[in-house]
Image: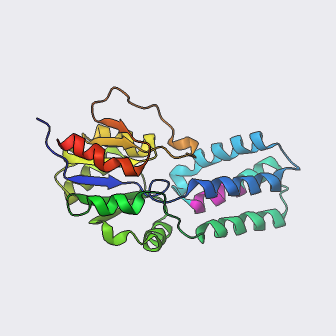
Amino acid sequence: MTAPLTAIGFDADDTLWHNERFFALTQEHFASLLAPHTDTEDLMDRLLAAERRNLPHYGFGIKGFTLSMIETAIDVTEGRVPASVVAEILHAGRDMLSHPVELLPHARETLEHLRGDFTLILITKGDLLHQEQKIAQSGLRDLFDAVEIVSAKTQVEYADIFARHADGPQRGLMAGNSMASDVLPMLHAGGWGVFVPHGITWAVEHADAPKRHPRFAEIAHLGALPALIEGVNA
């Protein structure tokens, strides 16, 4: 018999609150700024390549994204990008950092429903200061038993987090919108990985679904999570 779940982990960005859509809006503005130098498809390809290249150096988050936009602007203009364009990119980055947190549907209700019956853990990655600010602004902090802000979500990280805060990953579940960061490494750690699709997902976070894995599940929205957990623990 499978041991019952005792701990539930939640991703933050685009699982509990909106995030990627602000990146998409900024990319549109970025494309308009560089339109005299290249088309949007080429620009986005170069930007994504810069982001992938810079992840080991800058990590995840808006600050690294802003630096990658500046690097891409220098690249596509062969070093002739006007200072005014660089200033606009920096301003766009600051706007993203100051944007208010907007909760996704079912986020608060699901946490309130599960609280008390399970150890709830918020597991997010990115810039420490900005993630702390978003967690505080969300109004959800008191619903969690623990909060972990990590530089990357890996099998080792999940095993450590669920061992420290609960009964280990084998009795834990991680829910999030990234197959690559929220689902696959949690499955590799021995836990449940639940995919909660979001309308916009960063290309870096894409991965094939492990559809035949016995501990993988996909739900349409967070509101369906309590029923799924009930079924697992039945």
Query: How did the renderer colour the structure?
Result: rainbow
The x and y percentages for residue 42 are 76, 40
Picture quarter with the N terminus: top left
Which residue appears farthest toward the right when viewing the image?
36
Where is 68 relative to 193, above or below? below
**Is 118 contained in the magenta span?**
no
Which residues fall within the magenta stretch?
A: 62-70
Residue closer to the observer: 152 or 101: 101
Q: Residue at x 40, y 54 (%)?
A: 11
- The prevailing secondary structure element of the residues shown in magenta is helix
**Is 65 contained in the magenta span?**
yes
Q: How many marks?
A: 0
In the image, 64: left or right of 8? right
Q: Residue at x 71, y 69 (%)?
A: 91
Which residue appears farthest toward the left when viewing the image?
1
Residue closer to the observer: 84 or 41: 41
Where is 157 relative to 180, above or below? below
In the image, 168: left or right of 135? left
The x and y percentages for residue 188 are 30, 37
Q: Name which quarter of the figure residue 70 lies in.
A: bottom right
In the image, 207: left or right of 26? left
Q: Residue at x 49, y 63 (%)?
A: 103
Residue closer to the observer: 102 or 174: 102
In the image, 188: left or right of 207? left
Q: Is residue 150 visible?
A: no
Picture quarter with the C terminus: top left
The x and y percentages for residue 49 are 64, 42
Q: Name which quarter of the figure residue 80 lies in.
A: bottom right
Q: Is residue 44 visible?
A: yes
Q: Residue at x 82, y 42 (%)?
A: 39
The x and y percentages for residue 107 are 41, 59
